[in-house]
Amino acid sequence: LYAFAYGSGVFSQAKMAKQQPGGVPPMIDMVIAVRNPAMWHARNMLTNPHHYPWWVRWGGHWALRKVQNMGAGIWYVPYVKSEGEVRHFF
């Protein structure tokens, strides 16, 4: 398992730089790589169901595995609020 983050909210910024135009808070993009994505998502869905759209929660790990096996094999979750900030998970 490894993870890294990037984006305007990763490192502390000056007070004026924290607020982007329109009052949007800084954003953090997180990349999480795991050995067994199906197991990781099954556990994460129990802990953080709001990280997943309704149709994945309804379809469970089967729906998620189906989507993740298409294309590049990456699950992308935009606009997750965590600790008061918006994050994107890959």
Image: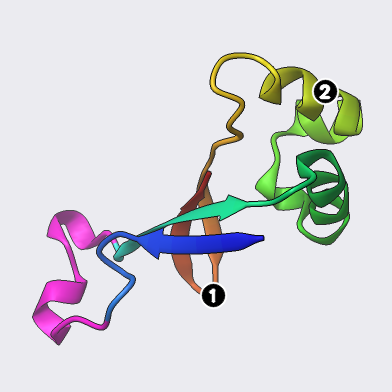
x, y (%) of residue 21? 13, 57
- Left/right of residue 70 with respect to residue 81 in the rendered view: right
Instruction: Specify the quadrant that holds the N terminus.
Output: bottom right
* Residue lying at 54% horizontally and 62% vertically, measured from the top left: 3
The secondary element bearing badge 1 is classed as loop
Q: Nearer the viewer, residue 44 or 4?
A: 4
- Mark 2 vs mark 1, foreground winner is 2
Q: Nearer the viewer, residue 72 or 58?
A: 72
What colouring method underlies this structural image?
Answer: rainbow
Q: What's the amino acid at mark 2?
A: Ala
Q: What's the amino acid at mark 1?
A: Glu
Distance from the alpha carbon under mark 2 to that under mark 1: 28 Å
Residue 3 sits above or below residue 49 on the image: below
Q: Nearer the viewer, residue 76 or 48?
A: 76
Residue 12 sits above or below residue 72 on the image: below
Which portion, as a residue range, is magenta?
Answer: 12-24
* Residue lying at 54% horizontally and 22% vertically, measured from the top left: 72
Residue 47 sits above or below residue 78 on the image: below
The residue at which mark 1 appears reads as: 83
> How many tags in the picture?
2
Q: Badge 2: few (under 14), some or many (20 or more) residues near its Cα, within 10 Å?
A: few
- Left/right of residue 67 with respect to residue 2 in the rendered view: right
Q: Which mark is residue 19?
A: none
x, y (%) of residue 40? 80, 51
The residue at which mark 2 appears reads as: 63
* Residue lying at 70% horizontally and 34% vertically, measured from the top left: 53
The secondary element bearing badge 2 is classed as helix
Residue 15 sits above or below residue 74 on the image: below
* Residue lying at 61% horizontally and 51% vertically, measured from the top left: 33
Q: Quadrant of residue 10?
A: bottom left
x, y (%) of residue 32? 58, 54
The answer to if 13 sits in the magenta stretch is yes
